[in-house]
Image (cartoon, grey):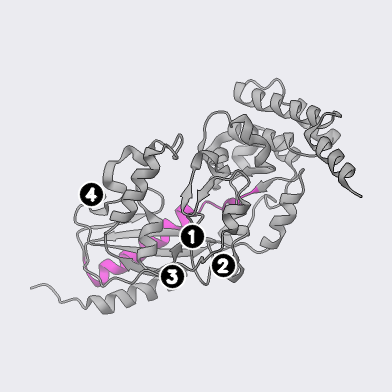
Amino acid sequence: MGVSVDYSALALAIKTWASELGFQAAGISDLDLSADEAHLDAWLTAGQQGDMAYMARHGRKRSRPEQLLPGTLRVISVRMDYFPPGIAGADKILSDTCAAYVSRYALGRDYHKLLRNRLKRLSQRINEAAASTTHRVFVDSAPVLEKALARNAGLGWVGKHTNLLSRDAGSWFFLGEIFTDLPLPVDQPLTSHCGSCQACIDICPTQAILSPFELDARRCISYLTIELHGPIPALLRPLIGNRIYGCDDCQLICPWNRYATPTPEADFLPRHHLDGAQLSTLFAWSEEEFLKKTEGSPIRRIGHLRWLRNIAVALGNATPEPEIIASLQSRANHPSELVREHVAWALRQIALEATPESPILRRLSRLREATP
Protein backbone atom coordinates (compact mmCIF):
# COMPACT_ATOMS: atom_id res chain seq x y z
CA MET A 1 0.00 0.00 0.00
CA GLY A 2 1.14 3.53 -0.74
CA VAL A 3 2.12 5.94 2.02
CA SER A 4 -0.68 8.31 3.04
CA VAL A 5 0.08 11.97 2.30
CA ASP A 6 -1.23 14.90 4.32
CA TYR A 7 -1.74 17.31 1.41
CA SER A 8 -2.58 20.28 3.65
CA ALA A 9 0.71 19.86 5.47
CA LEU A 10 2.50 19.36 2.16
CA ALA A 11 1.05 22.61 0.77
CA LEU A 12 2.43 24.51 3.78
CA ALA A 13 5.78 22.78 3.40
CA ILE A 14 5.95 23.72 -0.30
CA LYS A 15 5.60 27.40 0.61
CA THR A 16 8.33 27.08 3.23
CA TRP A 17 10.67 25.32 0.80
CA ALA A 18 9.93 27.97 -1.85
CA SER A 19 10.94 30.69 0.59
CA GLU A 20 14.15 28.85 1.45
CA LEU A 21 14.97 28.72 -2.28
CA GLY A 22 14.67 32.48 -2.66
CA PHE A 23 11.08 32.84 -3.85
CA GLN A 24 9.19 35.65 -2.16
CA ALA A 25 5.79 33.95 -2.46
CA ALA A 26 4.17 30.69 -3.56
CA GLY A 27 0.56 29.66 -4.01
CA ILE A 28 -1.56 26.83 -5.40
CA SER A 29 -4.45 27.01 -7.86
CA ASP A 30 -6.84 24.71 -9.67
CA LEU A 31 -7.10 24.68 -13.46
CA ASP A 32 -10.24 26.76 -14.10
CA LEU A 33 -9.28 29.54 -16.53
CA SER A 34 -12.56 29.73 -18.42
CA ALA A 35 -13.02 33.49 -17.99
CA ASP A 36 -9.41 34.09 -19.02
CA GLU A 37 -9.88 31.86 -22.05
CA ALA A 38 -12.76 34.04 -23.24
CA HIS A 39 -10.63 37.17 -22.73
CA LEU A 40 -7.74 35.59 -24.65
CA ASP A 41 -10.04 34.58 -27.51
CA ALA A 42 -11.37 38.14 -27.83
CA TRP A 43 -7.83 39.56 -27.77
CA LEU A 44 -6.67 37.18 -30.50
CA THR A 45 -9.77 37.81 -32.61
CA ALA A 46 -9.02 41.54 -32.46
CA GLY A 47 -5.50 40.82 -33.74
CA GLN A 48 -3.95 42.66 -30.80
CA GLN A 49 -1.17 40.07 -30.50
CA GLY A 50 0.48 41.53 -33.60
CA ASP A 51 3.20 39.26 -34.98
CA MET A 52 3.17 36.99 -31.92
CA ALA A 53 1.60 34.10 -33.82
CA TYR A 54 2.67 31.70 -31.08
CA MET A 55 -0.09 33.14 -28.87
CA ALA A 56 -2.66 31.20 -30.92
CA ARG A 57 -0.47 28.35 -32.14
CA HIS A 58 -1.17 25.89 -29.32
CA GLY A 59 -4.96 25.89 -29.36
CA ARG A 60 -6.47 25.58 -25.89
CA LYS A 61 -3.27 24.43 -24.17
CA ARG A 62 -2.60 27.95 -22.92
CA SER A 63 -5.91 28.23 -21.05
CA ARG A 64 -6.39 24.53 -20.25
CA PRO A 65 -3.31 23.27 -18.37
CA GLU A 66 -4.54 19.68 -18.40
CA GLN A 67 -4.21 19.68 -22.19
CA LEU A 68 -0.64 20.95 -22.01
CA LEU A 69 0.32 18.28 -19.47
CA PRO A 70 -2.29 15.50 -19.19
CA GLY A 71 -2.92 14.43 -15.61
CA THR A 72 -2.34 17.89 -14.14
CA LEU A 73 -4.60 18.69 -11.17
CA ARG A 74 -2.92 21.73 -9.63
CA VAL A 75 -0.50 24.50 -10.53
CA ILE A 76 2.04 25.78 -8.01
CA SER A 77 2.93 29.40 -8.83
CA VAL A 78 5.96 31.20 -7.41
CA ARG A 79 7.13 34.80 -7.36
CA MET A 80 10.71 36.09 -7.37
CA ASP A 81 11.32 39.82 -7.01
CA TYR A 82 13.79 41.55 -9.36
CA PHE A 83 13.44 45.19 -8.25
CA PRO A 84 17.01 46.54 -8.65
CA PRO A 85 18.60 49.13 -6.34
CA GLY A 86 18.70 52.63 -7.76
CA ILE A 87 15.31 52.37 -9.43
CA ALA A 88 14.75 56.00 -8.52
CA GLY A 89 17.17 56.86 -11.32
CA ALA A 90 14.81 55.53 -13.98
CA ASP A 91 13.01 58.85 -14.41
CA LYS A 92 16.34 60.65 -14.77
CA ILE A 93 17.39 58.31 -17.57
CA LEU A 94 14.06 58.70 -19.37
CA SER A 95 14.40 62.48 -19.26
CA ASP A 96 17.93 62.38 -20.72
CA THR A 97 17.31 61.96 -24.44
CA CYS A 98 20.91 60.95 -25.11
CA ALA A 99 20.86 58.13 -22.54
CA ALA A 100 19.54 54.63 -23.24
CA TYR A 101 16.65 53.23 -21.25
CA VAL A 102 16.56 49.44 -20.78
CA SER A 103 13.63 47.81 -19.02
CA ARG A 104 14.65 47.12 -15.43
CA TYR A 105 14.04 43.37 -15.73
CA ALA A 106 16.72 43.11 -18.44
CA LEU A 107 19.54 44.98 -16.69
CA GLY A 108 21.03 41.83 -15.17
CA ARG A 109 21.24 38.17 -16.11
CA ASP A 110 18.42 36.33 -17.84
CA TYR A 111 15.97 35.20 -15.19
CA HIS A 112 14.80 32.08 -17.03
CA LYS A 113 17.70 29.83 -16.07
CA LEU A 114 17.85 31.02 -12.47
CA LEU A 115 14.13 30.50 -11.85
CA ARG A 116 14.07 27.18 -13.66
CA ASN A 117 16.93 25.79 -11.58
CA ARG A 118 15.28 26.89 -8.34
CA LEU A 119 11.94 25.44 -9.44
CA LYS A 120 13.59 22.13 -10.29
CA ARG A 121 15.00 21.99 -6.78
CA LEU A 122 11.58 22.75 -5.36
CA SER A 123 10.04 20.10 -7.60
CA GLN A 124 12.58 17.56 -6.37
CA ARG A 125 11.72 18.25 -2.74
CA ILE A 126 8.02 17.85 -3.49
CA ASN A 127 8.67 14.51 -5.20
CA GLU A 128 10.70 13.31 -2.26
CA ALA A 129 7.76 14.06 0.02
CA ALA A 130 5.02 12.72 -2.26
CA ALA A 131 5.98 10.97 -5.47
CA SER A 132 4.00 12.14 -8.47
CA THR A 133 3.73 10.84 -12.01
CA THR A 134 2.88 14.23 -13.51
CA HIS A 135 5.32 16.98 -12.66
CA ARG A 136 6.76 19.71 -14.88
CA VAL A 137 8.44 23.08 -14.38
CA PHE A 138 7.69 26.13 -16.54
CA VAL A 139 9.36 29.55 -16.83
CA ASP A 140 8.11 31.14 -20.06
CA SER A 141 8.92 27.82 -21.70
CA ALA A 142 5.43 26.76 -22.86
CA PRO A 143 1.97 28.21 -23.50
CA VAL A 144 1.00 29.05 -19.92
CA LEU A 145 -1.32 31.82 -18.68
CA GLU A 146 1.04 32.52 -15.82
CA LYS A 147 -0.52 35.76 -14.58
CA ALA A 148 -4.00 34.24 -14.41
CA LEU A 149 -2.69 31.16 -12.62
CA ALA A 150 -0.69 33.27 -10.15
CA ARG A 151 -3.78 35.42 -9.52
CA ASN A 152 -5.83 32.30 -8.81
CA ALA A 153 -3.07 31.11 -6.47
CA GLY A 154 -3.39 34.28 -4.41
CA LEU A 155 -0.11 35.89 -5.46
CA GLY A 156 -1.77 39.11 -6.58
CA TRP A 157 -4.36 40.63 -8.86
CA VAL A 158 -4.19 41.65 -12.51
CA GLY A 159 -3.90 45.42 -12.79
CA LYS A 160 -5.39 47.63 -15.46
CA HIS A 161 -2.06 47.48 -17.33
CA THR A 162 -2.47 43.65 -17.44
CA ASN A 163 0.54 43.04 -15.17
CA LEU A 164 0.15 41.12 -11.93
CA LEU A 165 0.24 43.32 -8.82
CA SER A 166 1.12 42.41 -5.25
CA ARG A 167 0.54 44.50 -2.13
CA ASP A 168 4.12 44.04 -0.95
CA ALA A 169 6.03 43.89 -4.25
CA GLY A 170 4.08 45.96 -6.75
CA SER A 171 4.80 44.37 -10.13
CA TRP A 172 8.60 44.08 -10.07
CA PHE A 173 8.77 40.29 -10.05
CA PHE A 174 9.07 37.17 -12.20
CA LEU A 175 6.73 34.18 -12.18
CA GLY A 176 7.25 30.46 -12.56
CA GLU A 177 5.06 27.36 -12.31
CA ILE A 178 5.06 23.69 -11.42
CA PHE A 179 2.28 21.57 -12.93
CA THR A 180 1.48 18.59 -10.71
CA ASP A 181 -1.02 15.76 -10.31
CA LEU A 182 -0.99 16.07 -6.52
CA PRO A 183 -4.47 17.05 -5.18
CA LEU A 184 -3.17 19.91 -3.04
CA PRO A 185 -5.57 22.35 -1.33
CA VAL A 186 -5.88 25.56 -3.35
CA ASP A 187 -5.39 29.16 -2.25
CA GLN A 188 -7.94 31.91 -2.70
CA PRO A 189 -7.54 34.63 -5.36
CA LEU A 190 -7.06 38.19 -4.17
CA THR A 191 -9.49 40.99 -4.97
CA SER A 192 -8.35 43.91 -7.11
CA HIS A 193 -6.98 46.98 -5.38
CA CYS A 194 -6.60 49.33 -8.35
CA GLY A 195 -9.78 51.21 -7.52
CA SER A 196 -10.39 54.24 -9.73
CA CYS A 197 -6.66 54.75 -10.45
CA GLN A 198 -5.74 54.73 -14.13
CA ALA A 199 -2.27 56.22 -13.92
CA CYS A 200 -0.87 53.36 -16.03
CA ILE A 201 -3.37 54.06 -18.80
CA ASP A 202 -2.65 57.78 -18.83
CA ILE A 203 1.16 57.45 -18.77
CA CYS A 204 1.56 54.92 -21.59
CA PRO A 205 3.64 56.72 -24.26
CA THR A 206 1.87 55.00 -27.17
CA GLN A 207 -1.56 54.65 -25.52
CA ALA A 208 -1.28 50.88 -25.87
CA ILE A 209 -3.61 50.30 -22.90
CA LEU A 210 -6.87 50.92 -24.73
CA SER A 211 -9.02 50.50 -21.62
CA PRO A 212 -8.65 48.78 -18.25
CA PHE A 213 -7.25 45.25 -18.80
CA GLU A 214 -7.07 45.71 -22.60
CA LEU A 215 -3.56 45.99 -24.03
CA ASP A 216 -2.96 46.32 -27.77
CA ALA A 217 0.48 44.74 -28.10
CA ARG A 218 0.93 46.29 -31.53
CA ARG A 219 1.33 49.69 -29.86
CA CYS A 220 3.26 48.52 -26.81
CA ILE A 221 6.91 49.63 -26.72
CA SER A 222 7.96 46.31 -25.19
CA TYR A 223 6.45 44.52 -28.18
CA LEU A 224 7.89 46.99 -30.68
CA THR A 225 11.44 46.78 -29.33
CA ILE A 226 11.54 43.07 -28.39
CA GLU A 227 8.93 40.96 -30.18
CA LEU A 228 8.61 42.77 -33.51
CA HIS A 229 11.11 41.48 -36.07
CA GLY A 230 10.56 43.96 -38.89
CA PRO A 231 10.44 47.75 -39.14
CA ILE A 232 8.91 49.71 -36.28
CA PRO A 233 5.87 51.64 -37.58
CA ALA A 234 7.04 55.17 -38.40
CA LEU A 235 4.13 56.85 -36.62
CA LEU A 236 5.09 55.18 -33.35
CA ARG A 237 8.83 55.85 -33.51
CA PRO A 238 8.74 59.40 -32.04
CA LEU A 239 6.70 58.06 -29.09
CA ILE A 240 9.33 55.49 -28.16
CA GLY A 241 11.71 58.16 -26.92
CA ASN A 242 14.97 56.64 -25.65
CA ARG A 243 13.54 53.24 -24.69
CA ILE A 244 15.74 50.75 -26.54
CA TYR A 245 14.62 47.50 -24.89
CA GLY A 246 11.22 47.27 -23.30
CA CYS A 247 9.30 49.88 -21.34
CA ASP A 248 8.47 50.32 -17.66
CA ASP A 249 6.33 53.45 -17.67
CA CYS A 250 3.16 51.72 -16.47
CA GLN A 251 5.14 50.14 -13.62
CA LEU A 252 7.10 53.26 -12.69
CA ILE A 253 3.87 55.23 -12.25
CA CYS A 254 1.95 52.54 -10.34
CA PRO A 255 1.36 53.54 -6.68
CA TRP A 256 1.71 49.92 -5.55
CA ASN A 257 5.34 49.81 -6.63
CA ARG A 258 6.29 52.13 -3.79
CA TYR A 259 6.12 49.04 -1.57
CA ALA A 260 8.64 47.03 -3.58
CA THR A 261 11.96 46.21 -1.93
CA PRO A 262 15.33 45.70 -3.68
CA THR A 263 16.08 42.20 -4.88
CA PRO A 264 18.48 40.03 -2.86
CA GLU A 265 19.56 38.24 -6.08
CA ALA A 266 22.95 39.41 -7.30
CA ASP A 267 22.19 38.02 -10.78
CA PHE A 268 19.48 40.64 -11.27
CA LEU A 269 21.78 43.60 -10.58
CA PRO A 270 22.74 45.83 -13.56
CA ARG A 271 25.64 44.70 -15.76
CA HIS A 272 27.84 46.60 -18.25
CA HIS A 273 26.42 49.94 -17.02
CA LEU A 274 23.17 49.31 -18.88
CA ASP A 275 21.29 51.28 -16.24
CA GLY A 276 22.53 54.57 -17.69
CA ALA A 277 24.66 54.09 -20.80
CA GLN A 278 24.73 56.66 -23.59
CA LEU A 279 22.93 55.80 -26.83
CA SER A 280 25.97 56.59 -28.98
CA THR A 281 28.13 54.22 -26.90
CA LEU A 282 25.73 51.30 -27.34
CA PHE A 283 25.17 52.09 -31.03
CA ALA A 284 28.91 51.69 -31.62
CA TRP A 285 28.95 48.09 -30.35
CA SER A 286 30.05 45.67 -33.04
CA GLU A 287 28.14 42.41 -33.31
CA GLU A 288 30.98 40.65 -31.51
CA GLU A 289 30.85 43.20 -28.70
CA PHE A 290 27.07 42.95 -28.53
CA LEU A 291 27.21 39.16 -28.20
CA LYS A 292 29.93 39.37 -25.55
CA LYS A 293 28.24 41.99 -23.41
CA THR A 294 24.77 40.45 -23.66
CA GLU A 295 25.94 36.93 -22.82
CA GLY A 296 23.52 35.54 -20.26
CA SER A 297 21.21 38.52 -20.80
CA PRO A 298 17.63 38.52 -22.13
CA ILE A 299 18.70 41.31 -24.49
CA ARG A 300 20.66 38.90 -26.64
CA ARG A 301 17.42 37.36 -27.97
CA ILE A 302 16.72 40.37 -30.24
CA GLY A 303 20.09 40.09 -31.98
CA HIS A 304 22.48 42.83 -33.08
CA LEU A 305 20.40 44.12 -36.01
CA ARG A 306 17.28 44.81 -33.95
CA TRP A 307 19.50 46.26 -31.23
CA LEU A 308 20.79 48.78 -33.81
CA ARG A 309 17.24 49.32 -35.13
CA ASN A 310 16.00 50.25 -31.67
CA ILE A 311 18.89 52.53 -30.86
CA ALA A 312 18.61 54.29 -34.23
CA VAL A 313 15.03 55.23 -33.35
CA ALA A 314 16.14 56.52 -29.95
CA LEU A 315 18.96 58.53 -31.55
CA GLY A 316 16.40 60.09 -33.88
CA ASN A 317 14.45 61.18 -30.83
CA ALA A 318 17.53 62.55 -29.02
CA THR A 319 18.72 66.12 -28.75
CA PRO A 320 20.53 66.68 -32.08
CA GLU A 321 24.04 67.06 -30.71
CA PRO A 322 27.04 66.55 -33.02
CA GLU A 323 27.88 63.22 -31.36
CA ILE A 324 24.34 61.94 -32.01
CA ILE A 325 24.45 62.90 -35.68
CA ALA A 326 27.93 61.42 -36.14
CA SER A 327 26.81 58.22 -34.47
CA LEU A 328 23.91 57.83 -36.90
CA GLN A 329 26.02 58.68 -39.91
CA SER A 330 28.48 55.94 -38.96
CA ARG A 331 25.73 53.36 -39.66
CA ALA A 332 24.11 55.08 -42.64
CA ASN A 333 25.52 52.50 -45.07
CA HIS A 334 25.02 49.46 -42.87
CA PRO A 335 24.60 46.19 -44.85
CA SER A 336 21.18 45.58 -43.27
CA GLU A 337 18.25 47.30 -44.95
CA LEU A 338 16.42 47.25 -41.61
CA VAL A 339 19.18 49.23 -39.94
CA ARG A 340 19.72 51.60 -42.90
CA GLU A 341 16.03 52.51 -43.07
CA HIS A 342 15.81 53.33 -39.35
CA VAL A 343 19.04 55.34 -39.49
CA ALA A 344 17.73 57.29 -42.48
CA TRP A 345 14.49 58.00 -40.61
CA ALA A 346 16.45 59.16 -37.57
CA LEU A 347 18.59 61.55 -39.62
CA ARG A 348 15.45 62.97 -41.27
CA GLN A 349 13.87 63.35 -37.85
CA ILE A 350 16.86 65.29 -36.55
CA ALA A 351 16.92 67.48 -39.66
CA LEU A 352 13.21 68.19 -39.25
CA GLU A 353 13.63 69.21 -35.62
CA ALA A 354 16.43 71.58 -36.60
CA THR A 355 14.36 73.57 -39.12
CA PRO A 356 12.17 76.61 -38.41
CA GLU A 357 9.20 74.44 -39.40
CA SER A 358 9.99 71.88 -36.70
CA PRO A 359 6.81 70.73 -34.93
CA ILE A 360 8.52 71.33 -31.58
CA LEU A 361 9.65 74.83 -32.54
CA ARG A 362 6.18 75.65 -33.84
CA ARG A 363 4.65 74.56 -30.55
CA LEU A 364 7.17 76.67 -28.60
CA SER A 365 6.41 79.64 -30.83
CA ARG A 366 2.68 79.32 -30.21
CA LEU A 367 3.29 79.08 -26.46
CA ARG A 368 5.40 82.26 -26.51
CA GLU A 369 2.69 84.09 -28.46
CA ALA A 370 0.07 82.97 -25.95
CA THR A 371 2.14 84.06 -22.93
CA PRO A 372 1.05 87.49 -21.55
Residue type (three-letter) at the residue carrying disc 3 = Ala
> Which dot marks residue 25?
3
Q: Quadrant of the N terminus?
A: bottom left
| Closer to the eye: label 4 or 2 | 2
Does residue 94 appear in the picture of this structure?
yes
Residue assigned mark 2 = 256
Residue assigned mark 4 = 67
Asked whether residue 129 is drawn in magenta, I would say: yes
Sooner in the amino-acid sequence: mark 3 or mark 1: 3
Q: How many neighbours does mark 1 have within 10 angstroms: few (below 14), some (14-19), or many (20 or more)?
A: many
The x and y percentages for residue 308 are: 65, 33
Residue type (three-letter) at the residue carrying disc 4 = Gln
Q: How many neighbours does mark 2 have within 10 angstroms: few (below 14), some (14-19), or many (20 or more)?
A: some
| Closer to the eye: label 4 or 1 | 1
The x and y percentages for residue 244 are: 64, 42
Q: How many neighbours does mark 3 have within 10 angstroms: few (below 14), some (14-19), or many (20 or more)?
A: some
Q: CA distance from mark 3 to mark 1?
A: 18 Å
Q: CA distance from mark 2 to mark 1?
A: 10 Å
Sooner in the amino-acid sequence: mark 2 or mark 1: 1
